[in-house]
Image (tube, grey):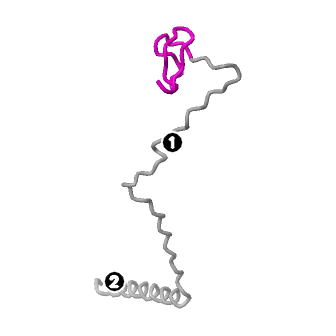
Amino acid sequence: MVNSWICPHCNSENSDKMKFCQLCHKPREYPEGYVPPEEPKKIPQSAIPDPRMQKQQAPEPEPIYALPSARAKHLQTILIVLNVLFVLGNLIALIILLK
């Protein structure tokens, strides 16, 4: 093996990536002061975007409704008054008709 280490307990040759001996299962011993390199951090699969998925679009803004103008408010008031008068006229006509 090119990148390997020899177990001091059983003298077996192990891959550099192994932290334990494959034969005796004892942990790898490092020289004093040596700090073994950390394994590269793996990116979680959920953090990698799937190119087949559609990109999320920003939600559309809420529509802005215009408030009725003063003229429209007056028109609504006039129509309500006319409807009330019409209903009252019909009630009076019904009462007269039924007598």
Q: Which residues are magenta?
A: 1-27
Label 1 vs label 2, nearer the camera: 1
Classed neighbour count for the residue bearing mark 1: other residues with Cα under 10 Å, few (<14), some (14–19), many (≥20): few
Instruction: Estimate the x, y position of residue 42 in percent, counting from the top left.
Output: 51, 38
Residues under numbered marks 1 and 2 in contact, where contact means CB atoms less than 8 Å apart = no
Residue that numbered label 1 is attached to:
43
Specify whether residue 5 is painted magenta: yes
Instruction: Estimate the x, y position of residue 58 in percent, counting from the top left.
Output: 48, 64
Label 1's element?
A: loop
Q: Residue at x 44, y 59 (%)?
A: 56
Q: Nearer the viewer, residue 59 or 48?
A: 48
Residue type at mark 1 is: Ile
Classed neighbour count for the residue bearing mark 2: other residues with Cα under 10 Å, few (<14), some (14–19), many (≥20): few
Q: Nearer the viewer, residue 45 or 98?
A: 45
Magenta stretch mostly in which secondary structure? loop
Instruction: Estimate the x, y position of residue 41 in percent, counting from the top left.
Output: 55, 38
Instruction: Estimate the x, y position of residue 62 in percent, counting from the top left.
Output: 50, 70
Left or right, 27 with reference to 60: right
Q: Nearer the viewer, residue 72 or 54?
A: 54
Identify whether 15 is placed above or below 77. above
Residue that numbered label 2 is attached to:
95
Label 2's element?
A: helix
Identify whether 37 is placed above or below 61. above
Q: Quadrant of the C terminus?
A: bottom left
Q: Residue at x 45, y 43 (%)?
A: 45
Point out the tag, 1 or 2, that comes first from the N-terminus.
Answer: 1
